[in-house]
Image (cartoon, grey):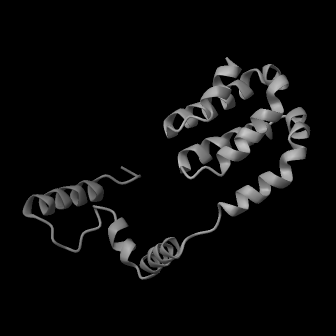
């Protein structure tokens, strides 16, 4: 099974590479000992997958590394890959100029109060109640004045 995954790891189809990463991650969470013989090759593949141009493959590779950090034994096993892993992760953090502009615009619209209007609760309307709503409000007010804590 692991050899078949190794063969599929070089598939040109993005979905296949994503599923290979998912399969290895799943095996790592349940039966990490099965991967001992292939651990070095798996780590190299996951480092390459982390640099994949397709974001879904890179995200699945990140899941593998997160799983590897869950137990003390696997933490020790990935120590030799840590330097390269950090370099690859940092290289993925850079934003393009277009992404930075989008982030700035989103931040500016949040700070301008534009989104506050979008998030205002529905029941918070500006005095434009209909006749039936006014009747309901009047009835509620009457009930609240008749029934107090003492009554």
Quadrant for the N terminus in the image: top right
Residue 53: x percent and y percent? 56, 53
Residue 41: x percent and y percent? 78, 34
Q: Can residue 99 be seen?
A: yes
Identify which residue, 21 or 119, lies in the foreground: 21
Identify which residue, 28 or 144, lies in the foreground: 28
Identify which residue, 37 or 90, lies in the foreground: 37
What residue is shown at x 15% (from left), y 67% (from top)?
129
Q: Is residue 58 above or below residue 31?
A: below
Identify which residue, 33 or 46, lies in the foreground: 46
What residue is shown at x 73% (from left), y 22% (from top)?
30
Q: Is residue 44 above or below residue 28?
A: below
Among the 4 quarters of the image, the one containing residue 32: top right
Q: Can residue 66 be seen?
A: no
Q: Residue furthest left?
A: 131
What residue is shown at x 28% (from left), y 61% (from top)?
122
Number of numbered discs: 0
Residue 27: x percent and y percent? 70, 24
Q: Residue furthest top?
A: 1
Viewed as shown, does residue 109 lie left or right of 103?
left
Among the 4 quarters of the image, the one containing residue 77: top right
Residue 102: x percent and y percent? 46, 73
Q: Is residue 10 above or below residue 33?
A: below
What residue is shown at x 50% (from left), y 36% (from top)?
15
């Amino acid at each position: 099974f692991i050899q078949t995954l190794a063969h599929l790891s070089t598939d040109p189809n993005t979905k296949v590479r994503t599923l290979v990463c998912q399969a290895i991650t799943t095996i790592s969470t349940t039966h990490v000992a099965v991967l001992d013989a292939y651990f070095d090759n798996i780590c190299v593949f996951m480092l390459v997958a982390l640099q994949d141009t397709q974001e879904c493959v890179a995200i699945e590779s990140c899941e593998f590394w997160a799983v590897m950090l869950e137990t003390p034994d696997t933490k020790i096993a990935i120590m030799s890959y840590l330097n390269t892993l950090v370099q690859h992760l940092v290289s993925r953090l850079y934003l393009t100029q277009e992404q930075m502009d989008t982030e700035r615009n989103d931040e500016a619209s949040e700070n301008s109060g534009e989104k506050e209007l979008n998030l205002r609760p529905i029941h918070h309307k500006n005095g434009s109640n209909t006749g039936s709503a006014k009747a309901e409000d009047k009835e509620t007010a009457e009930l609240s004045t008749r029934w107090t804590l003492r009554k």
